[in-house]
């Protein structure tokens, strides 16, 4: 996983599409979904940490 698009594709694989026209809110919702997928053991620890790193990086850009 290298960028925000990859995180969005990971979420899409599990039926989650997030778009609220507010990028900050989108990133927050994506983080919640990633945490839930990890809690339910749908994604690996590596996917979880990579996704969070990308989302936090994007949040810092805003």
Image: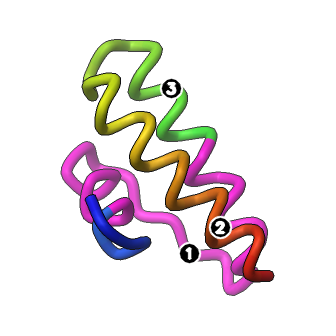
Mark-to-mark CA distance, 2 and 3 = 15 Å
Q: Which residue is mark 2?
A: 26
Q: Is residue 6 above or below residue 37?
A: below
Upstream in sequence: badge 2 or badge 1: 1
Question: Height in image: 15 above or below 49?
Answer: below
Q: Residue at x 60, y 46 (%)?
A: 31
Mark 2 crowdedness (10 Å alpha carbons): few <14, some 14-19, many ≥20: some
Quadrant where the image shows the N terminus: bottom left
Residue beneath disc 1: 19
The answer to which of 46 and 30 lies nearer the viewer is 46
Where does the image place residue 47, in percent across and percent down from the top left? 30, 38
Q: Position of residue 27 (x, y in %)?
A: 65, 63
Are the two marked residues, 2 and 1, in contact with CB atoms closer than 8 angstroms? yes
Q: Main secondary structure of the magenta part?
A: helix
- Residue at the spot x=40%, y=34% of the render? 48
Q: Which of pointers 2 and 3 lies earlier in the amino acid sequence?
A: 2
Q: Residue at x 77, y 70 (%)?
A: 60
Determine which residue is flagged by label 3.
Answer: 36
Residue reaching furthest left?
13
- Label 1 or label 3, whichever lies nearer to me, is 3
In front here: 42 or 60? 60
Name which of mark 1 and mark 3 comes first in the sequence. 1
Describe residue 38's horizontal placement relative to residue 21 as left or right. Answer: left
Distance from label 1 to label 3 (Cα)? 18 Å
Q: Quadrant of the C terminus?
A: bottom right
Residue 55, horizontal then vertical, whole percent: 58, 59
> Helix, strand or loop at disc 1?
loop
**Secondary structure category for the residue under label 3:** helix
């Amino acid at each position: 996983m290298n960028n925000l698009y990859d995180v969005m594709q990971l979420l899409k694989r599990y039926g989650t599409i997030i778009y609220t026209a507010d990028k900050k809110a989108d990133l927050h919702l994506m983080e919640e979904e990633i945490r839930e997928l990890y809690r339910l053991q749908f994604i690996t620890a590596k996917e979880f940490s990579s996704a969070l790193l990308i989302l936090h990086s994007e949040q810092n850009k805003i």
